[in-house]
Amino acid sequence: MESEIANATLRALRRVLRATDGGTRRLAVATGLTPSQLLVLREIDAGEDVTPGVVAQRLKFSHATITAIVDRLVALDLVTRTRSAQDKRKVLLEVTGAGRRRLVDAPDMLQVEFEAAFAMLPGWEQAMILAGTERLADLLGAGDDDAAPLLDAGAIDRD
Amino acid sequence: MESEIANATLRALRRVLRATDGGTRRLAVATGLTPSQLLVLREIDAGEDVTPGVVAQRLKFSHATITAIVDRLVALDLVTRTRSAQDKRKVLLEVTGAGRRRLVDAPDMLQVEFEAAFAMLPGWEQAMILAGTERLADLLGAGDDDAAPLLDAGAIDRD
DNA sequence: AATTATGTTTCACAATGCGAAATATATGGA
DNA sequence: TCCATATATTTCGCATTGTGAAACATAATT
């Protein structure tokens, strides 16, 4: 039992994944950072009172990994570390001016390119794409869009 | 100027990416391989007369990286290296029986989960999802088969 | 005070990924 | 034939990622 429509959709989905895959990678390289560094930098910039633990949890990396990456971001003067006064166990991470400048230079490519192309389509087509994509997301069992807007894989983990 | 439809579609796309994200990663770990190793193993299994150069090109990794990963796959007895008789510069890679067994044990999660859910939808909805996803892939500039993805970040000038 | 929980870092380790140089083989003239 | 150049792979040194286990330091609980 095999559906041609299912196969075609899978092919299309793979094209989508392929197109978005490595987006962060090229982006990071363009800014002189590694993909992970850019991810962490973004995460630090995103919220208030961000600690290594929070970043680790959001990106699903180990604490040890975050420590190492933050080390490099601090060395690059893109981030500062400050021990919290309320809870001296915590370390507060903040993006410096230079760090924010980097982020500005590294816009979310997915968003930028997508919006430009999308705007040129007729309304009915936009609606169709929206409906199809939403349904696809449901199908894949993706939870609500609560958090991290990330497009990385890992590798492999990529995949 | 911002389109609500575009934003909604982007949110849906992010949900899709999120759902598929880490798929290979989980998969690889489950088979005792790293994501990269699984990717390379699959690539070797995929074609005829596969050489390190071909793999490097397809996965967009450097030759040096492929050599290192193939080293490990060979050490694990999942792959064999043979010098080509026609062109002794080339090295032919082949998946061993054990290697193929690993691949069988590592079904494509995306495919399995997707097909099951997809089959339960009414035909018109399948068609809608297909159309939307294909259009989305076009939009993102994904090539037909294996071409280079085009979400390119133009070089950013930095002092 | 003693114990337990929480947050971060340190350490040793395996693996990625790269560019540059080294090596080996093919191929196309002069 | 001989030689230059192109192609295919490997070796080497390097920075980085990512992990778990253990070490620390500081809360919070009892």
Image (tube, coloured by chain):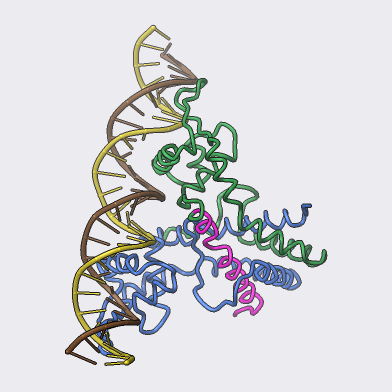
Chain colours: A blue, B green, C brown, D yellow
Q: Position of residue B93 (x, y in %)?
A: 50, 33
**Which of A92 and B72 lies nearest the eye of the viewer?**
B72
Q: Is residue B21 magenta?
A: yes
Instruction: Tell me if residue B108 can be seen.
Output: yes
Magenta segment includes A124: no
Query: Where on the picture, by quarter, is residue C11?
Result: bottom left
Left or right of residue A87, residue A40 in this image = right
Looking at the image, residue B90 lies above or below residue B115: above
Question: Residue B78, percent across and down?
Answer: 49, 39
Residue stretch rendered in magenta on the structure: B1-28
Q: Quadrant of residue A70?
A: bottom left
Q: Residue at x 73, y 63 (%)?
A: B118
Q: Judge left or right: residue A92 versus residue B71.
A: left
Closest to the observer, A36 or A78 = A36
Is residue A98 found left or right of D7 in the rendered image? left
**A158 relative to A149, above or below:** above
Q: Is residue B100 above or below residue A159?
A: above
Q: How many marks?
A: 0
Q: Position of residue A149 (x, y in %)?
A: 51, 72
Which x, y percent locates residue C8?
28, 74
Nearest the eye: A15 or A157: A157
- Say whether residue B157 is visible: no
Is most of the magenta stretch helix, strand or loop? helix
* Residue at (48% x, 60% y) in the render: B153
Quarter occupied by residue A146:
bottom right
